[in-house]
Amino acid sequence: MKQYRSDHPWIQSIRQLSVIVLAAVVVALISNHFRSDRLPLAGNWSQDARLTTPSGRQMAISLDEAKMLHQPNGAVFMDARPMEEYVNGHIQGAISLPWHEAEQKVMDIVMDMSNDTVIITYCDGDTCSLSKELALFLDNLGFSKTRILINGWSVWKDAGLPVEAGK
């Protein structure tokens, strides 16, 4: 194995690069410290934290709570999955509002709803973020009682609760 002397150009380049990177990190940390809107150095990436509005309101809802609200004049269920999945099966009475079409279709769907309507969004899979995105979108429109049923379609169907297929 070939040994390099400490004054070899490669060794000098690595040292210089290390000093530059270290200086950049120090400058970034110092400037972040003095910002009025500091960026957190460590984040909370738990499911609860991810399903919290910027104002701090927890958006997740349990299956039991959702089941109690699944009644006439209870809550409006919105399926954030693509239309094909909705047609193959959805929570009974749910409205299809695919996340990728929400901006175009939302006004037609919510125009008769008051801002205090409880809306429960859902999709399928523990890591599905469509329901979260739709819930945050609705929250930004002023629907302050929007909730998210995590892994909604699967947990609802597996619990033997009312489902239907088709449009």
Image (cartoon, grey):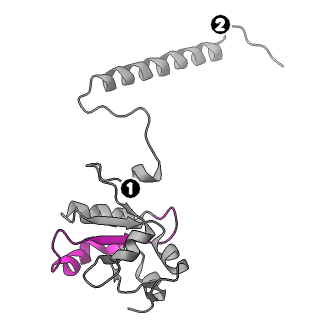
| Mark 2 or 1, closer to the camera | 1
Magenta-span inclusion, residue 118? yes
Badge 2 crowding class, 10 Å Cα cut-off, few under 14, some 14 to 19, many 20 or more, is: few
Place of residue 17 in the rendered image (x, y in percent of width and height, measured from the top left):
53, 20
User: Quick check: is 59 in the magenta stretch?
Assistant: no
Query: In the figure, is residue 28 to the left or right of 74?
Result: right
| Mark 1 secondary-structure assignment | loop
| Circle 1 Cα neighbour tier, 10 Å, few/some/many (<14 / 14–19 / ≥20) | many
Amino acid type of the residue that numbered disc 2 sits on in the rendered structure:
Asp
- Image coordinates of residue 80 in percent, x first then y, are 38, 73
Nearer-N-terminus badge (2/1): 2
Which disc is residue 7 wearing?
2
Q: Residue at x 32, y 23 (%)?
A: 33
**What whole-number distance in Å separates the C-alpha atoms at marks 2 and 1?**
54 Å
Q: Amino acid at mark 1?
A: Leu
Residue visible at 36% across and 71% down in the picture? 121
User: In front: 30, or 74?
Assistant: 74
Q: Which residues are magenta?
A: 99-128
Residue sitting farthest toward the right? 1
Q: Residue at x 21, y 66 (%)?
A: 143
Left or right of 73 in this view: 130: right
- Residue 16 on image: x %, y %: 53, 15
